Amino acid sequence: MQIAGKFEKVSFGQFCKDWLETFGGNEDSAREIYNRIRLPLRATAGSAGYDFFSPLNFTLAPGESIKIPTGIRVRMGEGWVLTCYPRSGLGFKYRLQLNNTVGVIDSDYYGSSNEGHIFAKLTNDSREGKTLELAAGTGFMQAIFLPFGVTEDDEAAAVRDGGFGSTSR
């Protein structure tokens, strides 16, 4: 196995800012949630995906969405990307989907002004009327490290500073 990266928590200050902007509340409640955040883990030695665990209890009726600040960032070596997907069982049972279909976390996102804070926006796309209830600490997303290449005439030199859509600004 090649070492591709390392998961870390973002600072409490960054998490608190993002959490309060998303859900409201107060700093004390954000601190409690932050202290319970678990770093992503593989479930078995043969697992490709690292499970992300929900920092909160949530319920999604069919058609509803939620944006989750995970409290996690990832440092990766050059030539690696982290791709994010819903957990297979949740996708199968509830058609749980990431709103951008596949999350792509580039290696230079780690150094962004938001500390590379990974968010997940999920939608319950159930066509069978199933409501998803997920407890805090339950895996909801899986992420896989993948190597990537560039063309021989690649001249990308821009520097990222931001999250979603920042590379097209």
Image (cartoon, helix red, strand yellow):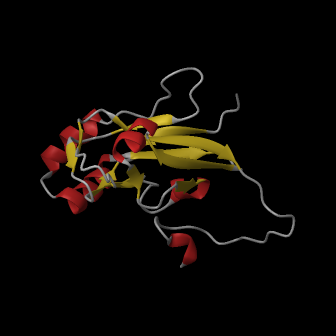
User: Residue 159: image x %, image y %?
Assistant: 61, 69
- The percent position of residue 35, horizontal first and vertical second, equals 26, 35
Which is more toward the observer, 114 or 119? 119
- So how many labels did they put on this image? 0
Q: Residue at x 70, y 27 (%)?
A: 1
Residue occupying the far top of the picture: 45
Please state which of residues 115 and 38 is positioned toward the viewer in this rendering.
Answer: 38
For the view shown, which residue lies furthest in the bottom direction?
Answer: 169
Q: Determine whether 140 is above or below 60 in the image.
A: above
* Residue 131, image x, y percentages: 22, 46
Apparent side of residue 65 relative to residue 107 in the rendered image (left or right): left
Q: Position of residue 129 (x, y in %)?
A: 24, 50
From this viewpoint, which residue is outermost toward the front? 128
Q: What residue appears at the point 57 percent right and 41 percent down from the top-left corner?
A: 144
Closer to the camera, 167 or 49? 49
Q: Quadrant of residue 66?
A: bottom left
Residue at (31% x, 36% y) in the render: 37
Q: Residue at x 20, y 46 (%)?
A: 59
Q: Quadrant of residue 157?
A: bottom right
Q: Quadrant of residue 33?
A: top left
* In-front residue for pair 77/92: 92
Q: In the visual, does 35 lie left or right of 72?
A: left
Please give left or right for residue 122 compared with residue 3 in the image: left
